[in-house]
Each structure stands twice: as C-alpha cells, then as structure tokens.
Image (tube, grey):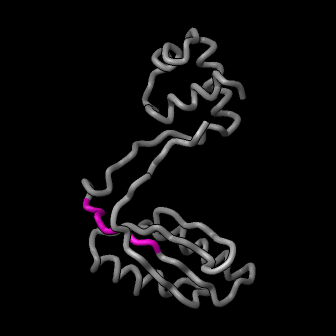
Amino acid sequence: MDEVDRKILAELQRDGRLTVTELAERVRLSVSPCHRRLRALEHSGAISGYRAQLDADVLGLTFEALVFVTMRYEDRDTVAAFEQAVVDIPHVMQAQRLFGDPDYLLRVVTRDLAAFQKLYDDRLATLPGVQRLSSTLVMKSVVENRPLPL
C-alpha cells in the first residue's frame, strides 16, 4: 500500500458515495488506474464494505449506555455462547473482549431508559456465563465514527 492508496482510502472514509471519476480527480489519477487500485483495495480486504451512516437520535435511539460484563466462567464453550448471544442482540452496537476485569465492554443504544431496563433484565442479565453486569450512561459523545488514521 502506497501513499496513493492511502489517499483513496482517506477520501472514501470521508465520502463512500464518490464515483470513481470523482475519486480519481481527488487523488489526482486518471480513472482507469484509480479504478484498478480501488478494486485491488476491495479484494485485499482493506475496504471491507460500504454503508450509510445513520443518526441514532433522528431514529429515536437516544439512550446510550456502556455495560461492563464480568464473566463467572471463561471456558471456551461459555465464551463462544456468550459472544454469539451478544451478536444476536441488535441493540448492542459494539462488543469488545478486554484483558483484565471487566471481561467485556458493550455499547448499547435504546429508545429510552425503560427500553434499556427491559433489555438489561430480559437479555443482558441472562447471557451465558455472566457473573456481574455494571453499566454507566453516556452523557455525550465527544468522538465517534472517526475515520481511521492513515
């Protein structure tokens, strides 16, 4: 990957809807070489997909919480079952396995506090292998959806 590839990636992070012609113009290439580089970046996995960035507030998902999960059991089967169960909960926007305590960090969005409480009681508290859940509410997002530093 060279500097031109990084410029292509940076431009696409800013605006994934650019046409190849617009992209080529921004990175100062002709269309054919730009298109070849773009396809190579897609095939290499550097570009894993394209999607629309939605506004959670506009869509009524205004409540956000961080949930810290401490596991009771951490054997391979329990961890796999826990992680699959988390994947199956649409309101979990991010789930990260951590070193140390707690074992996982989940970022959860819901409509409001009542919806979060129901999700917490009905789904999160019943996840396989969980010993303890602890949550904190997000007051304000300072940085989110930041492009990767290239």
Give the quarter of the figure containing the N terminus: top right
**Quarter of the view holding residue 99:** bottom right
Is 71 left or right of 61, judged from the image as shown? right
Q: Nearer the viewer, residue 14 or 138?
A: 138
**Residue 147 image point, x, y percent:** 51, 42
Q: Is residue 139 above or below residue 32?
A: below
Q: Is residue 48 above or below residue 123?
A: above
Please provide the residue range marked out in magenta: 60-66
Q: Is residue 112 above or below residue 41?
A: below
Question: What residue is shown at x 45% (from left), y 21% (from top)?
Answer: 19
**Quarter of the view holding residue 9:** top right
Q: Nearer the viewer, residue 138 or 16?
A: 138
**Residue 30 image point, x, y percent:** 57, 9
Q: Magenta includes 140?
A: no
**Quarter of the view holding residue 22:** top left
Q: Nearer the viewer, residue 37 or 8?
A: 8
| Residue furthest out toward the right | 76
Question: What residue is shown at x 59% (from left), y 67% (from top)?
Answer: 96
**Residue 26 image point, x, y percent:** 49, 17
